[in-house]
Amino acid sequence: MPRKNGKPLKKDAARQGGGLLLRIIGGAWRGRRIHFPPVEAIRPTPDRVRETLFNWLQMDVAGSRCLDLYAGSGALGLEALSRGASRVVFVEVDSGAARHLSQTLQDLQCDRGAVVTTDAKHYLAGISEPFDIVFVDPPYADHALADICSRIEKGGWLRPGGLAYLEDAAAAGPPVLPPGWTLLKSKRAGAVGYHLARREPPAAA
């Protein structure tokens, strides 16, 4: 069923007891089912897309510092924590979803995650800290991907050599990247287009 934000409800998110469930695919919490509230705008990245993404990232996640913008259910950031990320900051504008994500981290007894209740643009306007991996998955209908990537670049939120996961409607085609970013991987799964980009280090003098 289409959602108001232009994103379809993912089949991997199973309804149960008025809420929804997602499954952690790999790492310490492999197979763990995570509840999240039935908020209109939340739609987790599907299992098969997450599996492909973390195959792309398999050598880069352990010990990394990650930023999960538009966190929603927290599927991407939780998957990164399960696979050994040293820290994940989850940014989610919906206060109910953010509270639920904080509770999920408590239930997992994980102190490596922090939840910030704000919108992505407001967060990126703050004092930056460089992350190793940034997950960028805005509502498709907002057409915000290029602008958010530009804000990440201008604010220094992604370290040189860092990686960005970018998700958009497949119909949108390849993402528009800031200068100095390189598109490494692109795939589509149904209506979802997903990509991996790298912020290239400065050229040696």
Image (tube, rainbow, N blue to C red):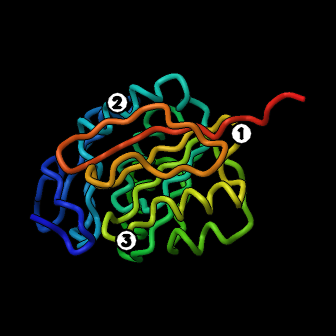
**What SS does tag 3 mark?**
helix
Sort mark 2 into few (<14), some (14-19) or many (20+) by Cα contacts within 10 Å. Answer: some
Residue with the mark numbered 2: 26
Q: Nearer the viewer, mark 3 or mark 2?
A: 3
* Contact flag, marks 3 and 2 (Cβ < 8 Å): no
Q: Name the amino acid, label 2.
A: Gly
Residue at image x 39%, y 66%? 143
Residue at the image point whose x is 60% and y is 59% from the top: 150
Q: Secondary structure at mark 1?
A: strand
Q: Earlier in the sequence, mark 2 or mark 1?
A: 2
Residue drawn 33% across the image and 31% down it: 52
Residue 140: x %, y % from top left: 32, 63
Looking at the image, which residue is at 46% across and 44% down?
165
Q: Amino acid at mark 1?
A: Pro
Query: Which numbered marker is on residue 160?
Result: 1
Mark 3 Cα within 10 Å, few/some/many (few <14, many 20+)?
Answer: few
Q: Residues within 10 Å of mark 1 (few under 14, many from 20)?
A: some
Camera sees residue 65: yes
Q: Disc 3 or 2, which lies upstream in sequence? A: 2
Q: Which residue is mark 3?
A: 142
User: Picture coordinates of residue 205 (x, y %)?
Assistant: 90, 29
Whether residue 86 is visible: no
Q: Residue furthest right?
A: 205
Residue 38 vs residue 146, the one in the foreground: 146
Q: Quadrant of the N terminus?
A: bottom left
Is disc 2 in contact with disc 1, using a CB cutoff of under 8 Å? no
Q: Position of residue 63 (x, y in %)?
A: 61, 32
* Distance CA(mark 3)–CA(mark 2): 31 Å
Q: Position of residue 167 (x, y in %)?
A: 37, 50
